[in-house]
Image: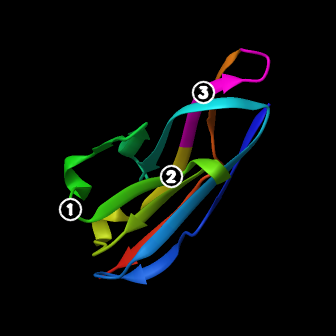
Amino acid sequence: QVQLVESGGGSVQAGGSLRLSCAASGSIFSINAMGWYRQAPGKQRELVAAIRGGSTNYADAVKGRFTISRDNAKNTVYLQMNNLEPEDTATYYCNVGGTGRTWQPYSVWGQGTQVTVSS
């Protein structure tokens, strides 16, 4: 099994910054894609940013403000969030997909971390 541990959420004022981390561990043979999603109350979960190999993809709402990166040696993905806006308030979830040591594909979710931005 593959487990994810997220950290880095919190409360900030508009214009502030936060950095989220998500570390994967367990029966990992390879990691293909890593991504961050968010879900605000009453809304559907949406993709914020994803990274696969050297390619990244961002939601239009966060382009230019958020940066996703990964440390392959640590099986960790980061989300640097700058110039935060109240609209960024949500629970942020990490998702990692790849191949396990038993050659089975996996896609797992983190437990979620709350980000609250006040105006």
Say which quadrant the N terminus sits in. Answer: top right
Instruction: Describe the element under mark 1 as helix, strand or loop.
Output: loop
Give the numbered dot on residue 70: 2
Q: Which residue is mark 3?
A: 98
Marks 2 and 3 sit apart, C-alpha to C-alpha, by 14 Å
Is 99 colored magenta in this rendering?
yes
Residue 77: % across, % down: 54, 52
Q: Which residue is mark 1?
A: 64
> How many numbered circles does the render carry?
3
- At a point 27% along the width and 75% down the height, the residue shown is 83
Residue 56: % across, % down: 33, 43
Mark 3 / mark 1, whichever is N-terminal? 1
Q: Are marks 2 and 3 in contact (CB under 8 Å)?
A: no
Residue 58: % across, % down: 28, 46
Is 117 colored magenta in this rendering?
no
Q: Amino acid at mark 1?
A: Gly
